[in-house]
Image (cartoon, rainbow, N blue to C red):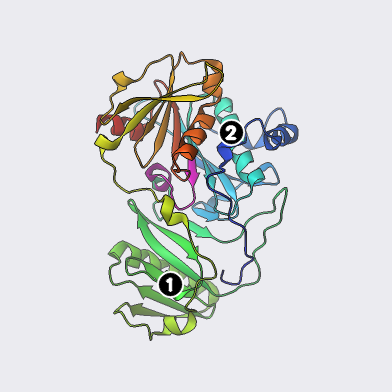
Amino acid sequence: MSGLVKQKKYDWKDTNLALFGSDTEKQVKKESAETEPAWAGAGQEVSLKIWRIVKFKVTDVDPADYGKFFSGDSYIVLNTYKPNPDSEELAFDVHFWIGKYSTQDEYGTAAYKTVELDTFLDDRAVQHREVMNRESDLFLSYFPKGITIMEGGADSGFRHVTVQEYKPRLLQFSRKGRNVSVFEVPFSQKRLTPGDVFILDSGSRIIQWNGAECNKDEKFQAAMYVQKLESEQKATSEVIEDNGSTNTAIHSILPVDDEEEDDDEADAIPKDTDPSTFELYKASDAAGTLEFTKVKEGGVTIDDFDTNDVFMLNTGRTLFVWVGNGASPTEKQNSLGYAHAHLAKRNQGMMPVTVLKEGFTCADFYAAIAA
């Protein structure tokens, strides 16, 4: 993997939502002060704030690095905004982002601290779980220039992930929604796909390879990235247009085989969904065991939700967990756990999750039920 420390990818199906009540949560509670210093000033004005989890601690990310994420880490992102520009009332979306190689202590802490941040905000936030490479459109919208995902990570409470000395790397530029995101991918010819743009960065030499089917936004973002690398590394650059040849400069540097296979495609999230395929479930543990009852298939309206229960709307792209005001305290507290159980049962562990309380603002949810 580009000369970096090879890391063990966690099992996406054994996701952090199952960790509440575990030793990880107890450790987090033990390490947490009565008042979390990181939350000081959070949610007081319109802003975007990002934290990274390091050794059970919530640490500030430098604003200059917003949009950059390490695959070995977990993050918390708070977006504070005004739903009505003519009002002073603020609304909140809080996301926890899970890197592919983030450890259980890291993503468990991120999940727990997300709930804690919501409590700090007087339970007024809409909560979101984001999985690397399957981010929601809302999350991506915070970063107009796209997100950059790099290998490596911070120190962990249970293991140490380090980024070694500079090694050649392969970067993929791919449009996701309205934005172009950047990912470091395994150093291999197999990663060159015609629909995207790639940069081979070997330090003093930079090669931009434009896939035959790439779009102008991907080309533009990659060109801007090359200019930055040229300035920082005093490097030379060249551009190769994909014409089907495998005898180019970039092919002569990249090995033919991957060092590891990527099995995430089996759990891919479709870009577009059909309301006729939506499924609405009611979640309940009143009988002592968690049960999901299918309420409806196809188009869903707000009238299909009951204030006394917790519902899950599975659109095939996002799982929305709607928490009624009259739901029991246990049901309210376990809404993230319900989402985990539902997705694990359906083999959809990588799907973005949004938890919103009755009456709260969530544009994506209301767009889905109005579709």
Quarter that holds the C terminus: top left
Other-residue count near label 1 (Cα within 10 Å), few / some / many at <14 / 14–19 / ≥20: few
Which SS class for mark 2?
loop
User: Residue 349: x, y in percent?
Assistant: 48, 43
Place residue 117 in its image quadrant. Answer: top right
User: Residue 132: x, y in percent?
Assistant: 49, 51
* Vertical placement of residue 290 versus 225, above or below: above
Residue 90 appears in the picture as rendered: no
Which SS class for mark 1?
helix
Quarter that holds the N terminus: bottom right
Q: Which residues are magenta?
A: 129-140
Q: Nearer the viewer, residue 105 or 241?
A: 105
Other-residue count near label 2 (Cα within 10 Å), few / some / many at <14 / 14–19 / ≥20: few
The reply to whether callout 2 and callout 1 are in contact (CB within 8 Å) is no
Residue type indicated by callout 2:
Gly
Q: Which residue is mark 1?
A: 190
Q: Which residue is mark 2?
A: 41
How many discs mark residues in the rendered view? 2
Place residue 306 in its image quadrant. Answer: top left
User: Residue 369: x, y in percent?
Assistant: 29, 29
* Vertical placement of residue 115 versus 47, above or below: above
The label shown at residue 120 is none
Q: Residue at x 28, y 64 (%)?
A: 215
* Vertical placement of residue 237 versus 152, above or below: below
Nearer the N terminus, badge 2 or badge 1?
2
Measure how far apart labels 2 and 1 are at the Cα level. 47 Å
Q: Nearer the viewer, mark 2 or mark 1?
A: 1
Q: Residue at x 45, y 53 (%)?
A: 133
